[in-house]
Amino acid sequence: MGIETTSVVKLLVISHCFPPDAQVGGLRVTEFCRYLPEFGIQPIVLTIDDKYRLRLDQTFSPVAGLHVERTEVEATRMDWYRRSKALLGVGGNSSQPAKVSPVTPAREGLLRRNLITLLQFPGPDSGWYRPAIRAAEKLIWEESIAGIISSSPPVVSHRIARHLKEKFNLPWLADFRDPWTAPQHRDKPAWWRRANQRMESRCVRATDRVICNTELIRQEFLRSYPDLPQQKFLTLTNGYVTFPGASLKLANAGNQILLLHVGDIYRLRRIDTFCIAVEKLLKAGKLDATKFRIVLLGTTEPKLEAAAREAAPELFGNGCVEFRNRVDRDEALRALWQADLLLLFQGGHVLQIPAKFYEYLSTGKPIFAVAQKGALTDLLEETGAGIWADSEKPDEIAAGLLRAFALPSFSPGEVQQRWYERFHYRSLTARLAACFHDLAAARETHPRT
């Protein structure tokens, strides 16, 4: 697969997440950069310096010869607020008599929430905005950059790209791995949501293409911007790379069936209803506690784990569920090959498909998802890679799990035949490159000032 080009053009890739950052968001950008040179595009990555990252994973496979510009990050208003609190001491001077607050605790909580939101506005990563712009402008002049692609979250990448678009009028593709105003932001103040909608609108209208990693996100954009041409919005899913199968010891020896979830469990990704369902199957004699093992490989939000333990005490008492600490990417990928059934907990995240789904897909192992109907369940049904059950219905989960045990696995050859053209990152990058070349060609035909 290839695109004929007369010369190599340079593309500035703006992404806050990038290896060795342990966040999975950097994977999509990395794989695009790996294959873009095959299609006449030389990527140059702009990201933050590694010292600002919360967690590093050195097993992410680097892209040979890739130019990566890593910048400083400035302190934000929130950073100064935290430092001021630390200098003053938490709780203030205890030798002074306490003052009676004129506001109620609820009102005080509301005021504090608005203050914290204001200090973080327009985003907790906004300290990257000015250093990135300085570095990007220098790169554009020195490297003769022909275009820009920005990837979010965080959305500061798109804000940086919009500034560059307005100044240099280069072709710009805005890649959305998640919606700008996602469901988890509903607890934000109304003024924050309105301000973010305005910022999103300015970016969407300024960019030449909006790339969405699920079709449902694209449909949401079309509903939000009915006055814009539909061809401005493009679906380009996440994908997988081919990796060798190897075994990481997770289960006891013997003939236990291993149910494995790889990755963090947080926010709306509840696991308590799944545990209730498995406990019901145990009590009904439809499952034998000695014949299966559930391993959750990654960080689980404490309140979600506590809710699961409380909801299904017998399941945990039998030792059927094991929470394991997060491991690096290489170990996580190797672990997939030992599983008999791969688990996904998507909960109420209906517009997104987790990146791990595509890595699951590449193994050919059957998938069982606990989710509400949305982008993930649609793709599961379309590919036939597994089945799903509603995350709010334990009885439905129990019935679905029994059916999932009987699902077949696909051989490497069948995986290649079924999904390579659609989901391998080389194929996805070919479509991304074609989109950029089309924009560049249109620009040469109809140049603008």
Image (cartoon, rainbow, N blue to C red):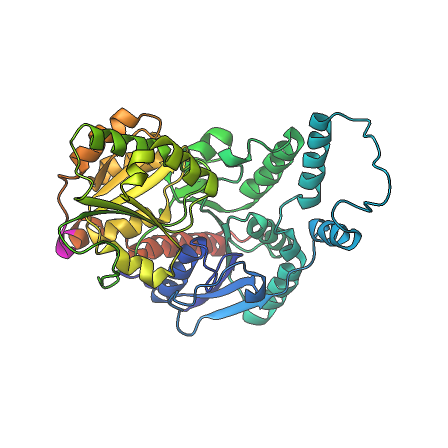
When the figure is inspected, residue 384 is found, relative to residue 242, above or below; the finding is above
| Residue 44 belongs to the span the image colors magenta | no
Name above or below for residue 342 compared with residue 440: above
Residue 440 vs residue 332, the one in the foreground: 332
- The magenta segment is 410-414
Residue 217 image-quadrant placement: top left
* Foreground residue among 332 and 69: 332
Judged left or right of residue 265, residue 412 is: left
Q: Is residue 403 above or below residue 79?
A: above
Quadrant assignment, res 316: top left
Query: Left or right: 364 with respect to 354?
Result: left
Please say whether residue 371 is visible from this viewpoint: no
Toward the bottom, the furthest residue is: 65
Instruction: Name the residue: 57% across, 39% down.
Output: 200
Image position, residue 274 (x, y; %): 31, 34
Residue occupying the point 39% across, 65% down: 60
Q: Position of residue 386 (x, y in %)?
A: 21, 39
Instruction: Please report the residue visible at 20 percent of the width from the left and 40 percent of the height from the top.
Output: 289
264, 208: nearer the viewer: 264
> Can you give x and y, in whole percent of width and height, for residue 126 in the image?
64, 51
Q: Residue 100: in sight, yes or no?
A: yes
Q: Is 169 or 273 nearer to us in this picture?
A: 273
Q: Position of residue 76 (x, y in %)?
A: 70, 53
- Is 148 on the left-hand or right-hand side of 265? right
Number of on-image labels: 0
